[in-house]
């Protein structure tokens, strides 16, 4: 006895997908998806393999095991159900050599699909992208680090002093701390952690995308040395921030 139809319906609802959404992911017609679930048709082998890949199941489990009757008392079974119900977040990676092309193709799905991707299990649901950065303007974050950012859909969501990947027409792709400009509402101020670099303003209308930094990936065993002036600048910057916070609290 095959449980394929029953399991397909269960797995689809586990992800919260409609039949149309599931059919699109499997590259089949919605009517065929309905026929599979209602057991009016048997899924083709290539469709079954796609489903097994999405939900990390074997063919035997999908066809011969009633997944709806699985006991959820054990820790391992609960973890398994959680994995099946979570869609893996595929993160497109923009290396430095692709930065120029990204400015022109960021809105083109075909361009984005050509980028290499990876996954990070510790990230929750969201729209993520990774960018390679170069230079010493954000030390101690080393040159060559990869910043994983979550998409910010509205500039009003930006929180001052947090770090972001900012993609703009004039400045390209930069990793900075973003400060809202209270005097000029149509501008934001980009600040480097390395105090040798002066802050500068960017027009809001020139900003194409903003990604809030969530993780930093860098090479192991990389040491970065600060000179006395850099350390002094960092301390002064921290003191200014503390003073500003005290004023706001008072």
Image (cartoon, rainbow, N blue to C red):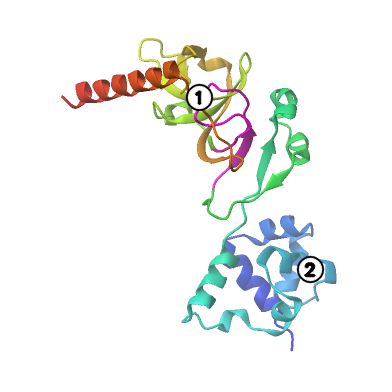
Name the N-terminal-most of marks 2 and 1: 2
Was residue 136 drawn as part of the magenta stretch in this picture?
A: yes
Q: Identify the residue at horizontal 47%, vertical 11% (top origin).
A: 198
Q: Quadrant of residue 23?
A: bottom right
Residue lying at 20% horizontally and 21% vertically, measured from the top left: 247
Q: Nearer the viewer, residue 176 or 145?
A: 145
Q: Is residue 138 left or right of residue 144?
A: left
- Give x and y (percent) for residue 10: 61, 72
Tell which of 99 and 62 is nearer to you.
99
Magenta-colored segment: predominant secondary structure = loop
Left or right placement of residue 18 versus residue 63 in this view: left
Any magenta on residue 129?
A: yes
Residue named by callout 2: 49
- Mark identifier at residue 176: 1
Q: Position of residue 22 (x, y in %)?
A: 68, 60
The part of the chain drawn in magenta is 126-149
Q: Nearer the viewer, mark 2 or mark 1?
A: 1
């Amino acid at each position: 006895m095959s449980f394929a139809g029953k399991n397909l319906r269960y797995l689809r609802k586990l992800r919260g997908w409609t039949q149309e959404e599931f059919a699109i992911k499997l590259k089949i017609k919605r009517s065929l998806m309905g026929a599979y679930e209602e057991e009016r048709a048997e899924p083709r082998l290539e469709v079954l393999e796609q489903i097994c890949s999405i939900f990390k199941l074997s063919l035997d489990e999908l066809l011969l095991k009633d997944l709806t009757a699985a006991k959820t008392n054990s820790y391992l079974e609960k973890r398994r159900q959680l994995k099946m119900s979570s869609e893996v977040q595929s993160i497109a990676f923009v290396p430095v050599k692709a930065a120029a092309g990204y400015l022109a193709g960021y809105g083109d799905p075909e361009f984005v699909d050509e980028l290499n991707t990876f996954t990070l299990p510790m990230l929750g649901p969201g729209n993520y992208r990774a960018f390679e950065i170069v230079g010493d303007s954000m030390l101690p974050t080393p040159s060559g680090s990869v910043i994983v950012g979550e998409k910010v859909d509205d500039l009003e969501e930006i929180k001052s002093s947090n770090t972001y990947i900012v993609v703009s027409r004039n400045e390209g792709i930069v990793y900075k701390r973003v400060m809202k400009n209270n005097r000029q509402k149509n501008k934001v101020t980009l600040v480097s952690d390395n105090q040798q670099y002066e802050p500068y303003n960017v027009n809001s209308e020139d900003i194409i995308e903003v990604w809030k930094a969530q993780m930093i990936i860098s090479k192991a065993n990389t040491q970065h040395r600060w000179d006395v002036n850099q350390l002094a600048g960092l301390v002064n910057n921290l003191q200014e921030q503390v003073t500003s916070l005290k004023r706001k609290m008072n």
